[in-house]
Amino acid sequence: MSDSKSYQAYMNSPYKSSKHSTYFDVYDKLFAPYIGKKITFIEIGILSGGSLFMWREFFGPQARIIGVELNPGAKRWEQEGFEIFIGSQSDPAFLEKLAQEVGEIDIVLDDGGHTYEQQIITTECLLPHIKDGGMLVVEDTHTSYMEGFGLRNRSFIKYAMNMVDRINHRFSGLTPHAAEKRVWGISFFESFVVFDVDRKATSVESVPTENNGEDLHAKDFRHADNQTYETLLKTSKGLSALKAVPGMRAVAKLVRATVSLPSNMKRARKLKEYF
């Protein structure tokens, strides 16, 4: 950690801050491109204030460092040049007022109470206010596997995985009404979920393209190790008229799903190990 810029800033802070040892490499990877730039950085959950000084040293004097805390005592850090907002991160009205007063945001770092409700509401409310090229970072997401932070079937990690599904629904072959357009991509690190914002990228229509290279008409071998599925594909091409029969599409979908399973039981059992 000694060669980590964020760790050095953390150790140089004059006030107490607590971080896990694995976090600094993640901070360096995510935040290094913003060093020395005029950015607006919001940290939710500042406790003893040490992290405010850490981020000011890390990003440099041009960065606007804003702290959000439920404890009114955090207002003391305004005399050190930080902007402090007092309120609950699980209160949408507070978060909306915060965003309106702050304006466009480059980075939000959620190091607040770590309950699923707090993490999800913070993400939902502040994502629309992140600038293109910015990010919303939720840390301590290991609480999704712990007791005392909410209903485990509605954990933050499950929420994030649902968003992954919606991101992939931007693909033109899937249902567009379920597509997620606020987030370009999501990255997962140990105890971190990172939401990258780029509205221009999310607005690009996902359609097949081809280059101008020579077509050698190579045979598609994707189902070569499942001859049953290969046979089904060939047969179905000659039965296209059956699509008009009521209920036939549902039957065809079920058949395709069944025969697409690994034909080799040993491989099927091996695949099951990954879930």
Image: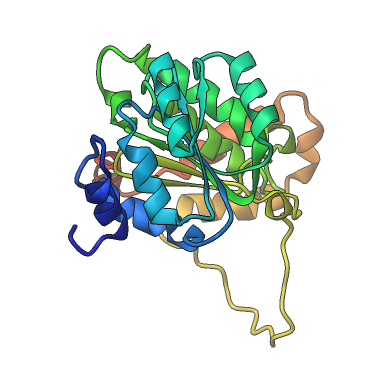
Colour setup of the view? rainbow
**Count of numbered badges drawn on the protein:** 0
In this view, 198 is above or below 169 = below
Q: Is residue 235 left or right of residue 231?
A: right
Q: Is residue 13 left or right of residue 207?
A: left
In this view, 134 is above or below 163 = below
- Across and down, in percent, residue 97 comes to 66, 21
- Across and down, in percent, residue 34 comes to 50, 58
- Which quarter of the figure is the C terminus placed in? top left
Query: 273 and 77: which one is in front?
Result: 77
- Which quarter of the figure is the N terminus placed in? bottom left
Q: Is residue 99 left or right of residue 42?
A: right
- Across and down, in percent, residue 156 comes to 42, 26
- Across and down, in percent, residue 37 comes to 55, 60
Residue 107 visible in the snapshot:
yes
Image point (38%, 58%), residue name: 29
